[in-house]
Amino acid sequence: MLERTARPLRGLSNGIAGVMRAIFGALGAPGRFLADLLNGVWLGHSLHAVLVDVVVGAATAALLLDLLRVLFGVEGLETATTWVVGLSWLAGAGSILTGLTDFKDTAPDSPTRDVAGLHGVLNIVGVGGFAFSTMARLNGKHDVAFWGLLVGYAIISVGAYIGGHVVYKHGYSVNVNAFSRGKRAAAFAPVLPAADLPEGMPTRATFGSTAVLLVRRGDVVHALKNTCSHAGGPLAEGRLDDGTIECPWHGSVFRLEDGSVVHGPATSRQVSYRARINGDQVELQGPHD
Ligand code: FES
Protein backbone atom coordinates (compact mmCIF):
# COMPACT_ATOMS: atom_id res chain seq x y z
CA MET A 1 0.00 0.00 0.00
CA LEU A 2 2.64 2.55 1.08
CA GLU A 3 4.87 1.29 -1.70
CA ARG A 4 2.16 2.05 -4.26
CA THR A 5 1.50 5.49 -2.75
CA ALA A 6 5.21 6.36 -2.84
CA ARG A 7 5.90 4.99 -6.33
CA PRO A 8 5.05 8.26 -8.20
CA LEU A 9 7.82 9.99 -6.20
CA ARG A 10 10.47 7.66 -7.67
CA GLY A 11 11.91 10.27 -10.06
CA LEU A 12 12.17 12.85 -7.29
CA SER A 13 13.68 10.32 -4.86
CA ASN A 14 16.30 9.17 -7.36
CA GLY A 15 17.11 12.79 -8.16
CA ILE A 16 17.57 13.81 -4.51
CA ALA A 17 19.71 10.74 -3.76
CA GLY A 18 21.83 11.46 -6.83
CA VAL A 19 22.37 15.09 -5.79
CA MET A 20 23.36 14.01 -2.27
CA ARG A 21 25.85 11.47 -3.62
CA ALA A 22 27.28 14.09 -5.97
CA ILE A 23 27.66 16.65 -3.16
CA PHE A 24 29.44 14.23 -0.80
CA GLY A 25 31.58 12.92 -3.67
CA ALA A 26 32.61 16.44 -4.71
CA LEU A 27 33.66 17.24 -1.14
CA GLY A 28 36.27 14.44 -1.23
CA ALA A 29 37.88 13.45 2.09
CA PRO A 30 36.00 16.11 4.12
CA GLY A 31 32.78 14.81 2.53
CA ARG A 32 33.59 11.30 3.70
CA PHE A 33 34.31 12.59 7.22
CA LEU A 34 31.01 14.47 7.19
CA ALA A 35 29.08 11.44 5.90
CA ASP A 36 30.60 9.24 8.64
CA LEU A 37 29.59 11.84 11.22
CA LEU A 38 26.00 12.06 9.91
CA ASN A 39 25.55 8.31 9.33
CA GLY A 40 26.58 7.70 12.96
CA VAL A 41 29.71 5.60 12.34
CA TRP A 42 31.25 7.12 15.51
CA LEU A 43 28.12 6.13 17.47
CA GLY A 44 27.83 2.59 16.13
CA HIS A 45 24.15 3.29 15.37
CA SER A 46 22.09 5.49 13.09
CA LEU A 47 22.39 9.13 14.24
CA HIS A 48 19.16 9.91 12.37
CA ALA A 49 17.15 7.71 14.75
CA VAL A 50 18.56 9.54 17.78
CA LEU A 51 17.68 13.00 16.43
CA VAL A 52 14.19 11.92 15.41
CA ASP A 53 13.52 11.01 19.05
CA VAL A 54 14.36 14.60 20.02
CA VAL A 55 12.07 16.03 17.31
CA VAL A 56 9.07 13.94 18.30
CA GLY A 57 9.67 14.35 22.03
CA ALA A 58 10.11 18.13 21.88
CA ALA A 59 7.14 18.61 19.53
CA THR A 60 4.91 16.50 21.81
CA ALA A 61 5.94 18.54 24.87
CA ALA A 62 5.38 21.81 22.98
CA LEU A 63 1.95 20.71 21.80
CA LEU A 64 0.97 19.77 25.36
CA LEU A 65 2.07 23.19 26.64
CA ASP A 66 0.16 24.92 23.84
CA LEU A 67 -2.98 22.87 24.51
CA LEU A 68 -2.83 23.81 28.21
CA ARG A 69 -2.75 27.47 27.14
CA VAL A 70 -5.41 27.24 24.39
CA LEU A 71 -7.87 24.86 26.05
CA PHE A 72 -7.47 25.67 29.75
CA GLY A 73 -6.13 29.21 29.68
CA VAL A 74 -2.97 28.36 31.63
CA GLU A 75 -0.81 31.48 31.59
CA GLY A 76 2.93 32.09 31.46
CA LEU A 77 3.79 29.13 29.19
CA GLU A 78 4.65 31.13 26.06
CA THR A 79 8.42 31.40 26.58
CA ALA A 80 8.83 27.74 27.49
CA THR A 81 6.75 26.68 24.48
CA THR A 82 8.84 28.84 22.14
CA TRP A 83 12.04 27.21 23.40
CA VAL A 84 10.68 23.70 23.03
CA VAL A 85 9.27 24.30 19.53
CA GLY A 86 12.62 25.86 18.59
CA LEU A 87 14.36 22.70 19.83
CA SER A 88 12.08 20.50 17.71
CA TRP A 89 12.89 22.68 14.68
CA LEU A 90 16.64 22.51 15.23
CA ALA A 91 16.58 18.76 15.84
CA GLY A 92 14.34 18.51 12.77
CA ALA A 93 16.98 20.25 10.65
CA GLY A 94 19.56 17.75 11.95
CA SER A 95 17.17 14.87 11.22
CA ILE A 96 16.72 16.06 7.64
CA LEU A 97 20.48 16.26 7.14
CA THR A 98 21.19 12.84 8.66
CA GLY A 99 18.20 11.34 6.86
CA LEU A 100 19.37 12.62 3.48
CA THR A 101 22.83 11.21 4.18
CA ASP A 102 21.36 7.75 4.88
CA PHE A 103 18.92 8.10 1.98
CA LYS A 104 21.62 8.61 -0.67
CA ASP A 105 22.66 4.94 -0.30
CA THR A 106 19.23 3.37 -0.74
CA ALA A 107 18.98 1.23 -3.88
CA PRO A 108 17.89 3.20 -6.98
CA ASP A 109 14.38 2.47 -8.32
CA SER A 110 13.57 0.34 -5.27
CA PRO A 111 10.40 0.34 -3.13
CA THR A 112 12.64 1.09 -0.13
CA ARG A 113 13.88 4.30 -1.75
CA ASP A 114 10.32 5.21 -2.82
CA VAL A 115 8.93 4.86 0.72
CA ALA A 116 11.97 6.53 2.31
CA GLY A 117 11.47 9.40 -0.16
CA LEU A 118 7.84 9.83 0.91
CA HIS A 119 8.94 9.74 4.57
CA GLY A 120 11.51 12.45 3.87
CA VAL A 121 9.18 14.75 1.92
CA LEU A 122 6.53 14.63 4.67
CA ASN A 123 9.03 15.29 7.43
CA ILE A 124 10.62 18.21 5.60
CA VAL A 125 7.16 19.78 5.30
CA GLY A 126 6.38 19.00 8.96
CA VAL A 127 9.64 20.52 10.18
CA GLY A 128 8.77 23.54 8.02
CA GLY A 129 5.63 23.86 10.18
CA PHE A 130 7.83 23.93 13.31
CA ALA A 131 10.04 26.61 11.75
CA PHE A 132 6.96 28.71 10.95
CA SER A 133 5.64 28.17 14.48
CA THR A 134 8.94 29.24 16.06
CA MET A 135 9.11 32.41 13.97
CA ALA A 136 5.51 33.30 14.74
CA ARG A 137 6.15 32.89 18.48
CA LEU A 138 9.25 35.08 18.32
CA ASN A 139 6.96 37.74 16.81
CA GLY A 140 4.44 37.30 19.61
CA LYS A 141 1.83 35.56 17.42
CA HIS A 142 1.17 32.57 19.64
CA ASP A 143 -2.28 31.68 18.30
CA VAL A 144 -1.07 31.43 14.69
CA ALA A 145 2.01 29.57 15.97
CA PHE A 146 -0.26 26.98 17.61
CA TRP A 147 -1.74 26.04 14.23
CA GLY A 148 1.71 25.81 12.64
CA LEU A 149 2.76 23.43 15.40
CA LEU A 150 -0.44 21.38 15.21
CA VAL A 151 -0.25 20.92 11.42
CA GLY A 152 3.50 20.19 11.58
CA TYR A 153 2.92 17.65 14.33
CA ALA A 154 0.20 15.86 12.35
CA ILE A 155 2.45 15.66 9.29
CA ILE A 156 5.54 14.40 11.12
CA SER A 157 3.39 11.80 12.90
CA VAL A 158 2.48 10.33 9.52
CA GLY A 159 6.11 10.75 8.40
CA ALA A 160 7.34 8.93 11.52
CA TYR A 161 4.95 6.04 10.87
CA ILE A 162 6.32 5.72 7.35
CA GLY A 163 9.88 5.94 8.70
CA GLY A 164 9.05 2.96 10.93
CA HIS A 165 7.86 1.12 7.82
CA VAL A 166 11.21 1.80 6.11
CA VAL A 167 13.14 0.33 9.06
CA TYR A 168 10.86 -2.44 10.36
CA LYS A 169 9.28 -3.65 7.11
CA HIS A 170 12.09 -2.93 4.62
CA GLY A 171 14.93 -3.44 7.10
CA TYR A 172 16.82 -0.34 5.96
CA SER A 173 19.58 0.87 8.34
CA VAL A 174 19.40 -2.46 10.16
CA ASN A 175 22.51 -4.63 10.52
CA VAL A 176 21.96 -7.14 7.71
CA ASN A 177 23.83 -9.80 9.73
CA ALA A 178 21.80 -9.31 12.92
CA PHE A 179 19.64 -12.40 12.36
CA SER A 180 22.11 -14.48 10.38
CA ARG A 181 25.55 -14.25 11.90
CA GLY A 182 26.40 -17.43 10.02
CA LYS A 183 28.13 -20.63 10.97
CA ARG A 184 29.66 -20.89 14.45
CA ALA A 185 32.56 -23.22 15.12
CA ALA A 186 34.22 -23.69 18.51
CA ALA A 187 37.15 -25.53 16.90
CA PHE A 188 39.13 -24.60 13.79
CA ALA A 189 37.65 -26.13 10.62
CA PRO A 190 39.08 -26.17 7.07
CA VAL A 191 37.52 -23.87 4.46
CA LEU A 192 39.96 -23.74 1.54
CA PRO A 193 43.25 -25.29 0.38
CA ALA A 194 45.99 -22.79 1.24
CA ALA A 195 47.25 -23.05 -2.36
CA ASP A 196 43.93 -21.53 -3.54
CA LEU A 197 44.37 -18.37 -1.45
CA PRO A 198 46.65 -15.96 -3.34
CA GLU A 199 48.60 -13.28 -1.48
CA GLY A 200 46.77 -9.94 -1.12
CA MET A 201 43.70 -10.94 -3.15
CA PRO A 202 40.15 -10.80 -1.72
CA THR A 203 38.91 -14.38 -2.04
CA ARG A 204 35.45 -15.81 -1.44
CA ALA A 205 35.09 -19.14 0.35
CA THR A 206 32.34 -20.91 2.26
CA PHE A 207 32.38 -21.80 5.92
CA GLY A 208 29.53 -24.30 6.24
CA SER A 209 26.83 -22.45 4.31
CA THR A 210 28.23 -19.01 5.20
CA ALA A 211 30.06 -17.04 2.51
CA VAL A 212 33.28 -15.54 3.88
CA LEU A 213 35.94 -13.17 2.61
CA LEU A 214 39.53 -14.38 3.05
CA VAL A 215 42.61 -12.21 2.66
CA ARG A 216 46.15 -13.55 2.98
CA ARG A 217 48.93 -11.21 4.03
CA GLY A 218 52.08 -13.26 4.36
CA ASP A 219 51.53 -15.87 7.05
CA VAL A 220 48.45 -14.06 8.37
CA VAL A 221 44.95 -14.77 7.07
CA HIS A 222 41.99 -12.50 7.77
CA ALA A 223 38.40 -13.68 7.53
CA LEU A 224 35.17 -11.67 7.54
CA LYS A 225 31.63 -12.63 6.70
CA ASN A 226 31.22 -11.82 3.02
CA THR A 227 27.81 -10.13 3.39
CA CYS A 228 28.27 -6.41 4.17
CA SER A 229 26.44 -5.39 7.35
CA HIS A 230 25.08 -2.26 5.63
CA ALA A 231 22.93 -3.71 2.84
CA GLY A 232 24.42 -7.08 1.93
CA GLY A 233 27.12 -6.15 -0.59
CA PRO A 234 29.70 -8.86 -1.47
CA LEU A 235 32.92 -7.85 0.29
CA ALA A 236 35.05 -10.33 -1.70
CA GLU A 237 34.37 -8.13 -4.74
CA GLY A 238 35.62 -5.08 -2.86
CA ARG A 239 38.91 -3.18 -2.86
CA LEU A 240 41.75 -3.92 -0.45
CA ASP A 241 43.65 -1.01 1.01
CA ASP A 242 46.10 -1.02 3.88
CA GLY A 243 44.49 -3.70 6.05
CA THR A 244 40.93 -2.75 5.10
CA ILE A 245 38.30 -3.86 2.58
CA GLU A 246 35.95 -1.42 0.86
CA CYS A 247 32.47 -2.72 -0.01
CA PRO A 248 31.77 -2.45 -3.75
CA TRP A 249 28.17 -1.27 -3.26
CA HIS A 250 28.30 1.93 -1.16
CA GLY A 251 31.91 2.16 -0.07
CA SER A 252 31.76 1.11 3.59
CA VAL A 253 35.28 0.28 4.79
CA PHE A 254 35.98 -2.46 7.37
CA ARG A 255 39.21 -3.42 9.17
CA LEU A 256 40.24 -6.92 8.09
CA GLU A 257 41.61 -7.66 11.54
CA ASP A 258 38.36 -7.39 13.48
CA GLY A 259 35.60 -6.18 11.11
CA SER A 260 35.33 -2.77 12.80
CA VAL A 261 33.90 0.07 10.70
CA VAL A 262 36.41 2.60 9.36
CA HIS A 263 33.95 4.42 7.06
CA GLY A 264 30.18 4.19 6.60
CA PRO A 265 27.46 4.13 5.59
CA ALA A 266 27.68 0.89 7.61
CA THR A 267 27.53 1.52 11.34
CA SER A 268 27.68 -2.12 12.46
CA ARG A 269 30.88 -4.12 12.79
CA GLN A 270 31.34 -6.89 10.23
CA VAL A 271 31.24 -10.46 11.55
CA SER A 272 34.88 -11.67 11.79
CA TYR A 273 36.58 -15.02 12.39
CA ARG A 274 39.92 -16.33 13.65
CA ALA A 275 41.83 -17.72 10.69
CA ARG A 276 45.05 -19.68 10.29
CA ILE A 277 46.97 -21.80 7.81
CA ASN A 278 47.34 -25.31 9.15
CA GLY A 279 49.33 -27.61 6.86
CA ASP A 280 47.84 -27.19 3.41
CA GLN A 281 44.47 -25.84 4.61
CA VAL A 282 43.06 -22.46 5.59
CA GLU A 283 41.03 -22.96 8.76
CA LEU A 284 38.48 -20.77 10.53
CA GLN A 285 37.08 -20.64 14.03
CA GLY A 286 34.52 -18.29 15.55
CA PRO A 287 33.05 -15.83 14.83
CA HIS A 288 34.46 -13.30 17.31
CA ASP A 289 31.71 -12.02 19.61
S1 FES B 1 26.19 -2.86 1.08
FE1 FES B 1 26.27 -0.73 1.40
S2 FES B 1 28.33 -0.39 1.91
FE2 FES B 1 28.20 -2.52 1.71
Image (cartoon, rainbow, N blue to C red):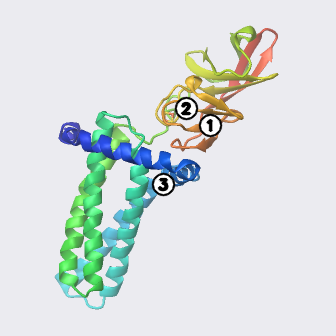
Q: Which quadrant holds residue 129?
A: bottom left
Check the picture and name the quadrant holding the C terminus: top right
Closer to the camera in the image, 184 or 202: 202
Q: Say which element carries label 1.
A: strand
Q: Of circles 3 and 1, which is in front?
A: 1
Badge 3 marks a residue whose secondary structure is helix
Of 173 and 179, nearer the camera is 173
Query: Is 162 placed above or below 3 here?
Result: below
Residue at the disc numbered 3 = 47
Question: Which numbered disc, 2 or 3, marks the residue that appears first in the sequence?
Answer: 3
Labels 1 and 2: the sequence-earlier one: 2
- Residue extending furthest toward the front: 26
Mark 2 lies within 8 Å of ligand 1 (Cβ measured): yes
Query: Residue 150: in sight, yes or no?
Result: yes
Residue farthest to the bottom, as pictured: 76
**What's the distance in space between the residues labelled 1 and 2, CA to CA?**
8 Å
- Amino acid type at mark 3: Leu
- Tell me the quadrant of the picture where the N terminus can be found: top left
Say if mark 1 contacts mark 2, CB within 8 Å.
yes
Amino acid at circle 2: Cys
Rendered image: mark on residue 247: 2
Q: Give the residue drawn at x 49%, y 54%.
A: 38
Q: Position of residue 203 (x, y in %)?
A: 63, 18
Residue matched to label 1: 254
Question: Disc 2 on helix, strand or loop?
Answer: loop
Crowding around mark 3 (Cα neighbors within 10 Å: few <14, some 14 to 19, many 20+) is many
Q: Amino acid at mark 1?
A: Phe
Quadrant position of residue 198:
top right
Give the class, few, some or many, for how many residues have Cα within 10 Å of label 1's Cα (few <14, many ≥20). Answer: many
